Amino acid sequence: MDRRQFLAIGTAALAAPALTGRATAKAVAGQPLPIPPVLDLSTRTDAKLEAIAGRNAFIEGKPARTFGYNQPYLGPVLRVRRGEIARPVVKNRLDFPVTTHWHGLHVPGAVDGGPQLAIAPGREWRPELEIDQPAATLWYHSHIHGQTGPQVYHGLAGMLIVEDPGAANPGLPSGWGIDDLPIVIQDRVIDPNGALVYNRSRPTMMHGLRGSEILVNGVMRPRASVARGLVRLRILNGSNARIYTLKFDDGRGFDQIASDGGLLPHPVTRRVLVLAPAERAEIVVDLSDGKDVRLVSLPDNNDPMGGMMGRGMGGMMRRMMGAGASANPEPVTSDGAFEVMRLVPDRPAPATRSLPQNLTGAAKPITAQPIRRRKVSLDMGPTAMMSTGNPLAINGRTYDMARIDFDVRQGDVELWEISAAMMAHPFHVHGTSFTVVSRNGRRTPFETTGAKDVVLVDGAAEILVEFRKKASRTTPYMLHCHILEHEDGGMMGQFTVS
Ligand code: C2O
Ligand code: CU
Ligand code: CU
């Protein structure tokens, strides 16, 4: 696929009416869950990660153009180890520039893979990644400014696992693909020919792209054959914009053991888990009763028309902001939840395990007094429009690769007050993990939120941040909304750490 064809994916969709492909898509739900290969970066120095074009059949017999790392769609699970240096070789075999950003990895701006680190077609990038953080489930994805949405949508993403050899939890399930599973959830618009449809219309840019088909590891509503016992799911919301409210269809509870930046101090029992774009959570669910269970999600109602501003808006403004553009998948339960995947516990459990009450090597909160307060307002709609001429901005300014928005001193602890206009925005910061202090004035206990690099801001939130690595003016760190259409549209800023 050349550049022109790639861009055409976006424009072609503008002319087409709403496409769902639901009727044909039914045929392939229930395929086995693919477990991506593991590429261990700590045992070799020449591990290649190649961005390639491929063909993937989301609908049986109808292969469609996709991108991936080393495979047609998505990429391998990368494994790195604390205390070691990972040296991946990233090669761009596509005919447009890509980057590879290590989302959640605490590495300097120079190797972070942000928009400034574009890899030209045919070129290679050899970053040295010093792994210096607790065990965690992270991810990687392309981050070209203005193209992150379509590139990730077509497959340029994968999971990244940090292991900490100094902090073992022998009680946690660890049989890869049997009772320890990578789960990358994405929603897509798939047309009747099996093609991924990426629409860049104004309403889509405002809502974020949401599709009516759910993929897990690239397969539509798959079934995973798992151990009849405790099963650990490392869940990544790899969607462009959709917020999931996950639960099991039989109402069974589960334990959350990790969030974005690593293990929680203790397992937290839940029945429902909200996961915004780019957030991760690890959960352990007990399937020793041998019963099939479906992982389902309530619909996402995060809508720029939902807020007070939206309700008061005139018809033209409503059309501009895209009222009614979301598509939700077909509900399967009486409360309107749709299916994500099915777990079938038909394999013997590896050993009797019991969930430890204290997790070793858990991520730690930031507790120091902040030396500075900083306001970050995620602007959207008429206010942003008036100050920037663009409906998406941060602190009154639309993203500009040539402008550094602020500087942070290495090692300083700062309190950031984030506010979100018109809808909930998943706010992300590069280069570190932060501690969420409050949301809408209510304290958020670290025991249940853990170390984060994305926080869903629906109103206001306060976070404590600290940067231990540097980022220069040529390769600064990003802060942005992780609704990829908002990020591409300019709800992004950049800062240095010196
Ligand atoms: Cu997931 Cu700026 O990144
Ligand atoms: Cu990131
Ligand atoms: Cu946003």
Image (tube, rainbow, N blue to C red):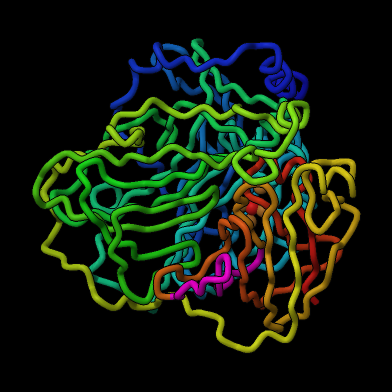
Task: Report the magenta residues as a range.
Answer: 430-446
Can I make out residue 315 in this image? Answer: yes
Tell me, yes or no, whether the highlighted magenta stretch contains residue 436. yes
Residue at 65%, 63% in the rendered image: 128
Q: Is residue 65 left or right of residue 491?
A: left
Q: Please, is residue 405 above or below residue 484 in the view?
A: below
> Can the viewer see residue 43?
no
Q: Nearer the viewer, residue 288 or 124?
A: 288
Q: x and y percent of residue 185 in the render?
A: 44, 41
Query: Whereabouts is ligand 2, in terms of quadrant?
Result: bottom right
The vertical placement of 335 against 109, above or below, is above
- The residue depicted at 30 percent of the width and 69 percent of the height is 267
**Is 232 colored magenta in this rendering?**
no
Residue 389 in the figure: left or right of residue 13: right
Where residue 130 sits in the image (x, y, percent)?
60, 70
Front-lying residue, 410 or 487? 487
* Residue farthest front in this picture: 312
- Name the residue at 23% across, 73% down: 356
Depth check, front residue: 149 or 274:
274
The residue at the far bottom in this view is 369
Q: Is residue 252 left or right of residue 151?
A: left
Q: Total number of numbered labels?
A: 0
**Residue 372: image x %, image y %?**
75, 82
Q: Residue at x 85, y 43 (%)?
A: 385
